[in-house]
Amino acid sequence: AGALAVRLPAVQPDMINTVAVLEFNGPVAIYPLPVLRVESDIFVNPLTLEIEQPALPALSVHYTLDGTEPVAASKVYSGPFQISETTMVKVRIFNQGEPASGLLSRRLEKVAPWPATAGKSGQQGLQYRYYEGDWQSVTALDGLTPKKEGMAQSFSLEDRLRDDFFGYEFQASLYAPADDVYRFFTESDDGSSLYIDGRLVVENDGPHGAREVMGMAPLAKGWHQLRVLYFERDGSEALKVSWQPPGAAKGAIPLDKLASGPGH
């Protein structure tokens, strides 16, 4: 058992037949890397780890949690387990006591949740500011005077005064129902960024077509400051903001988790 390294020439020897073929004398067993399933690589509460079991009964999964490489005498995986501190997990598949796969290494970090920094504002919803101009980044919105502003029930672009060369800033207090790690998403055309408590969580900036980017934030239970910036140059325009609380499906942020007011 062992790793196989194949060195290919920098220039293709045959510009027509471009497929490289490896020939082996005798049977060859190829084993993929182990698959480790976790909610995320950062965690606030105890984290459950699950490792995919090989289909062949002769294979076993060995792992370590202390940073050393697994050997035949290392712990054999038998089912999901939890960790509660920062851990370097290393996993390898063995075949009858011999290493059969490459080594999977993954650092899982326990983090402190960001403390709640905001109080609930006067009413449900978001405060928005609408701008007009030709920009390459959402950072250009900082310090500008808005063309108009008001309250919104969602991250909507419907109040825009034109279809190109405009931008929005949305602000609200966001309620996190528990200490945990939350996923946030922006899908936009063109650029967008999402901040929580002044920290950049989702970076989806710059001119581009519709695309979605995800970021994670460890939040303490309570109210946090949410800010979303968006700009549109030309062509199509779109903005969708979503979140995924722990143990829940991805979806729109519920209105009862957003609050704002004129002084937000």
Image (cartoon, helix red, strand yellow):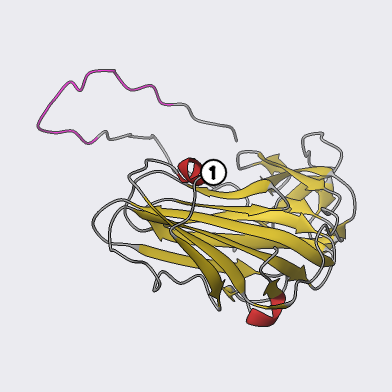
Residue 58 screen position, x and y as percent? 66, 57
141 vs 177, left or right, is left
Q: Name the quadrant containing residue 118.
A: bottom right
Q: In this view of the protein, which residue sits in the foreground, 145 or 151?
A: 145
Residue 244 in the image: above or below residue 208 = below
Identity of the residue drawn at 46% across and 41% down: 140
Residue 195 screen position, x and y as percent? 63, 52
Identity of the residue drawn at 37% across and 40% down: 136
Residue 240 screen position, x and y as percent? 47, 67
Q: In this view of the protein, which residue sits in the foreground, 74 or 243?
A: 243
> Residue tagged by mark 1?
142
Residue with the most extreme right position: 84
Label 1 Cα neighbours within 10 Å, binned few <14 / some 14-19 / many ≥20: few
Residue 18 is covered by the magenta coloring: yes
Residue 258 screen position, x and y as percent? 68, 73
31 vs 44, left or right, is left
User: Quarter of the image containing the C terminus?
Assistant: bottom right
Residue with the most extreme top position: 10
Identity of the residue drawn at 43% across and 42% down: 137
User: Quarter of the image containing the N terminus?
Assistant: top right
Magenta range is 6-19
Q: Amino acid at mark 1?
A: Asp
Q: In this view of the protein, which residue sits in the foreground, 96 or 193?
A: 193
Q: Main secondary structure of the magenta part?
A: loop
124 vs 141, left or right, is right
Question: How many labels sit on residues?
Answer: 1
Residue 173 is covered by the magenta coloring: no
